[in-house]
Amino acid sequence: MFPIIVVPGGHRVPICARRSGPNGNTVVNNAIYVRKPGPRSETPQTAQEWDDLLGRCQRNRRDELLDLMRDLVAGSVPQVEQMAQPSAFDTWVDESRVRWNDLVGQLPLEAGPRLQYGRYCFAYELVGQPLEISPAQFPGLLRQSAVRHTGWPPFWYPTRSGIEPYPIDGAVECWLGGDTELPIENRDAAHSDFWRIRSEGMAFLLRGFQEDVTDDLLHGRMGYQPGTVFDVSLPIWRVGETLLHAHSLAQNLFDGPTTVKFTAKYEGLAGRTLVSLGGRRYLSEDRVARQDDITLLTHVEAQAIDTNLPEIVHPLLSPLYALFDFFDLPMRMVSDELGQMRANNF
């Protein structure tokens, strides 16, 4: 006859009714109730009652708000909780690498697109509420999502015959290393990208090191040989631009808040010396990597990438640079390099 509904305290957000009572009486769907003298329960009627309710919720979130303030002062970006079990994303990355191996297996052993001296791959997964995208719309959205702060951007969508992307296995795929209009001896490691993107928000990019292009005039002047050096600035630019691509693609494919699970793997590092190819950065001593590969991972809110790019890139790449005789990647350098990158528009 007289049901009693008890809502325990300590909540960080107001609690609303999930459905109305019989005939819409007493309890109304989506209404928020507070206790009042009487005793009785009613929805807040005045600005003061709303302020009291929201104030209690904010006090219950005190520890969370303090942690956020500490992150802002320290210049860090909160990480999204990681999944412990293998996921569809892990399977996607593995399948993408197998697909690339199948393609390069058709080439001569010494061919540049085989990336024999080393390579890096970036992959990310967007998690959120996907929009309804038809297959015919997808290529146009991929072109719109391109971020062009360098002359060779990640996930470049070419239109020329021989290298234009194509649909395969539920994804859009592009392999520049298979350019049928370019002689095999003219295809180098840095311009033989292989990428795949699914409309569900999964992307994979594999590319060779620019440091291994033997006919580059800069390399010829400084006498570097393929597989011997690692530029101090390029990883910051490449990772930064790829994260911005993830942010752009999330805006075009998803509705509302979206997270980005991003992974980077570098291979062929052992024996390379950290250098500044353009001579803009002074390195006081030779720093050599002994470990051959490393995998890096971050998981952040997509909406945070545009405004917090240096705070995301710095902790992600620091373990990579530490392989070169404990090189400590300065936050100032990351901010400066990303600022120079974003000042470019192609």
Image (cartoon, grey):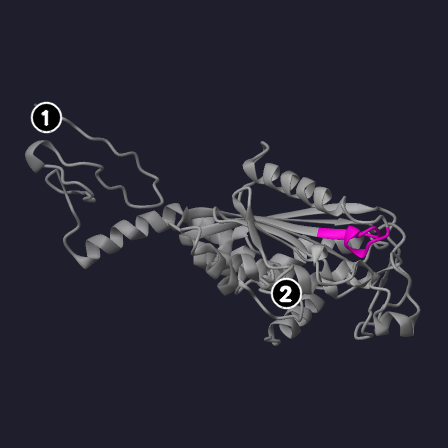
Q: Residue at x 58, y 31 (%)?
A: 85
Q: Residue at x 55, y 64 (%)?
A: 146
Is residue 119 highlighted in magenta? yes
What stretch of residues is rendered in magenta? 110-120
Q: Position of residue 305 (x, y in %)?
A: 54, 60
Element type at marker 1? loop
- Please tell me whether residue 248 is drawn above or below residue 11 in the rendered image: below
Q: Position of residue 115 (x, y in %)?
A: 79, 52
Quadrant in the picture for the C terminus = bottom right
Q: Is residue 149 visible?
A: yes
* Residue in the foreground of this view, choosing between 123 and 28: 123
Image side of residue 118 versus residue 89, left or right: right
Residue 73: quadrant of the picture:
bottom right
Q: Give the alpha-carbon distance from disc 2 to disc 1, as whole Å.
A: 67 Å
Residue beneath label 2, please?
153
Q: Residue at x 54, y 56 (%)?
A: 246
* Residues at discs 2 and 1 in contact (Cβ within 8 Å): no
Image side of residue 110 versus residue 124, left or right: right
Q: Residue at x 84, y 55 (%)?
A: 324
Image side of residue 226 versus residue 114, left or right: right
Q: Position of residue 239 (x, y in %)?
A: 65, 59
* Residue in the foreground of this view, choosing between 225 and 31: 225
The amino acid beneath tag 2 is Pro
Residue beneath label 1, please?
2
Q: Position of residue 112 (x, y in %)?
A: 81, 56
- Please tell me whether residue 339 is drawn above or below residue 115 in the rendered image: below
